[in-house]
Image (cartoon, helix red, strand yellow):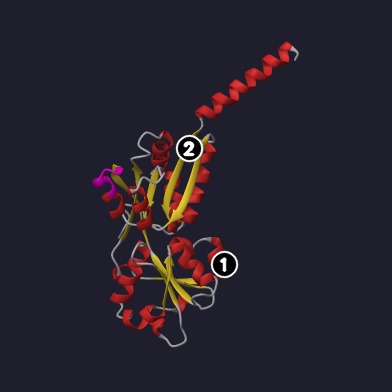
Amino acid sequence: MFQPLKSLLVGLAVAVGMSAAHAEKMTIAAAADLKFALTEIVTEYKTSHPKDDIEVVFGSSGKFSSQIQQNAPYDLFFSADILYPRELVKAGDAIGPAHPYAYGRIVLWSNTLDASKMTLDSLTGTDIKRVAIANPKHAPYGKRAEEALKAAGVWDKVEPKLVYGENISHTAQLVETGNAQVGVIALSLALNPKLAAQGKYWLIPDKLHEPLEQAFVITKRGADNPVAKSFAAYMEGPQARAVMKRYGFVLPGELK
């Protein structure tokens, strides 16, 4: 091979290797209510941190918490219930403190009925056969849905109609696909353009359930990951907060 060309190729290989070495990777486990908001925030973050490789996995907070206790490969954990991150910190599976990032809200949503004209009492009607909520056993939004239905005095009549989603995103899908006529889902999902175009929602009064205080935490695995620390700081900045507000989240310090 012509020597100058060979030297050039070797130089390029070294440069590419150095660039790859400096690229950082992080995996986030996030509550399903963040599906749209966090995806947008990650996209915005990467415009100023193009070398950072971030993967986000969405699911139920309770299941993620259990997986992290079993050394699952997550660097950051965004929970729909602050209790899970606090428990992980207490057990030594995460680096404290837990950082509150929002309060969630729950709504009735349907793509076949006008949910904006409904209340929880409407769910007792004989015309409604199936109601979707997230599984209260491991999904905080499901637990709050159960609390609201009980506080409204309709739990006994509605419980036989319930179908359970694995998480709040799956709950919305149950309604979308016709497996339920109406569902109790996160306001952040109802405000997504796709769901907003399909149906309407009714905001469930927050006095009917405990606050959905949400928090994130850096896991023990992510303690030395610079991307985890960088993104955690970005999450508390003005750009991320603006996205969260647009998706209906109430920010810390703004709960009335």
Amino acid found under the numbered disc labelled 1: Ala
Residue underneath mark 2: 25
Mark 2 residue crowding within 10 angstroms, few (<14) / some (14–19) / many (20+)? some
* Residue 79 % position (x, y): 36, 53
Q: Is residue 9 above or below residue 69?
A: above
Q: Is residue 2 above or below residue 117?
A: above
Of residues 222 and 113, the one nearer the viewer is 222
Quarter occupied by residue 142: bottom left
* Callout 2 secondary element: strand
Of residues 50 and 136, the one nearer the viewer is 136
Q: Is residue 221 above or below residue 106?
A: above
Kindly report which numbered mark, 2 or 1, lies closer to the viewer in this rendering.
2
Please report the residue visible at 40 percent of the width from the left and 35 percent of the height from the top: 225
Q: Is residue 92 magenta?
A: yes
* Residue 231 % position (x, y): 42, 40
The single residue placed furthest to the right in the displayed view is 2
Amino acid found under the numbered disc labelled 2: Lys
Please report the residue visible at 49 percent of the width from the left and 62 percent of the height from the top: 191
Residue underneath mark 1: 197
Q: Is residue 137 magenta?
A: no
Q: Give the mark, 2 or 1, whose residue is nearer the N terminus.
A: 2
Give, as a single range, the part of the protein colored magenta. Answer: 88-94
Of residues 168 and 114, the one nearer the viewer is 168
Mark 1 residue crowding within 10 angstroms, few (<14) / some (14–19) / many (20+)? few
